Amino acid sequence: MAKVFVADDNPHVHRIVKETLEAEGHEVSGVADGTRVMDALAGAMPDLALLDTTLPGAGASAICRSVLERRELDGIRMVVVAGPLEAVEEGDPLEPGVHAVVQKPLDAGMLLDLVRDLPAPEAVEGPDEAEPAETTLESLVSAALGSPSAGLSRAVIREQVEAVVAASMPAIVDRIADRLADRFTRVQDG
């Protein structure tokens, strides 16, 4: 199930998106006024946002820029919805953060394709990310010590902990690099 947000002042657009996507089990919310979009987006945290180019109060371009500035809204796929008379050329460069530009009138097939094209939800995070820092530290200590033995000096324990941290570091660096690369790719791809 995807969460879709519509920012458009045309009630027909809201109706077609709602009827089409809710019939497929998706959740739809939205606003008709550009001044309320950012708060509504933050509250809804949708997977996909359909943004009217000429929304009163703040059009799609301004909204996209604002979304990109707010880290908590990272991951929202933004699609600009142009009016039927607005020139939309295939191959025109997209605004930063925009995934696609579609033209009204919207149809059911187009909307379903947009939802189908959403990236798959990230895999459930491993226990290293789900656990609080103290638990993770305890697991590193346990791994370093193996089964506790009496008489280990602080220096020996320190060496073992350093070995475990050094062995874990490449995986941590890879995970951070993968997330950053994915984030930059989404911004560049729009």
Image (cartoon, helix red, strand yellow):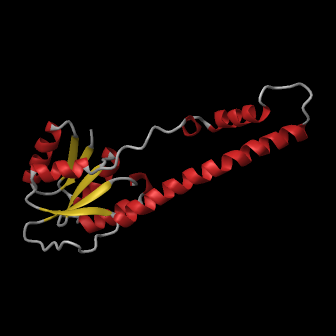
**Residue 170, image x and y in percent?**
64, 51
Q: Is residue 95 left or right of residue 156?
A: left
Q: In this view, does 180 lie to the left or right of 169?
A: left
- Kindly identify the residue that appears in the image at 51 percent across and 54 percent down: 178
Q: Quarter of the image for the N terminus: give it.
A: top left
**Residue 63, image x and y in percent?**
29, 63
Q: Quarter of the image for the C terminus: give it.
A: bottom left
**Residue 149, image x and y in percent?**
86, 25
Q: Count how many numbered circles sit on residues in the image.
A: 0
Q: Is residue 133 left or right of residue 94?
A: right
Camera-side residue: 56 or 98?
98
- Kindly identify the residue that appears in the image at 77 percent across and 36 percent down: 144
In the displayed structure, would residue 95 be above or below residue 133?
below
Residue 58 in sight from this viewpoint: no
Q: In this view, does 82 lie to the left or right of 138?
A: left
Camera-side residue: 89 or 130?
89
**Residue 42, image x and y in percent?**
35, 49
- Kindly identify the residue that appears in the image at 24 percent across and 47 percent down: 116
Residue 26 in sight from this viewpoint: yes
- Kindly identify the residue that appears in the image at 38 percent across and 66 percent down: 188
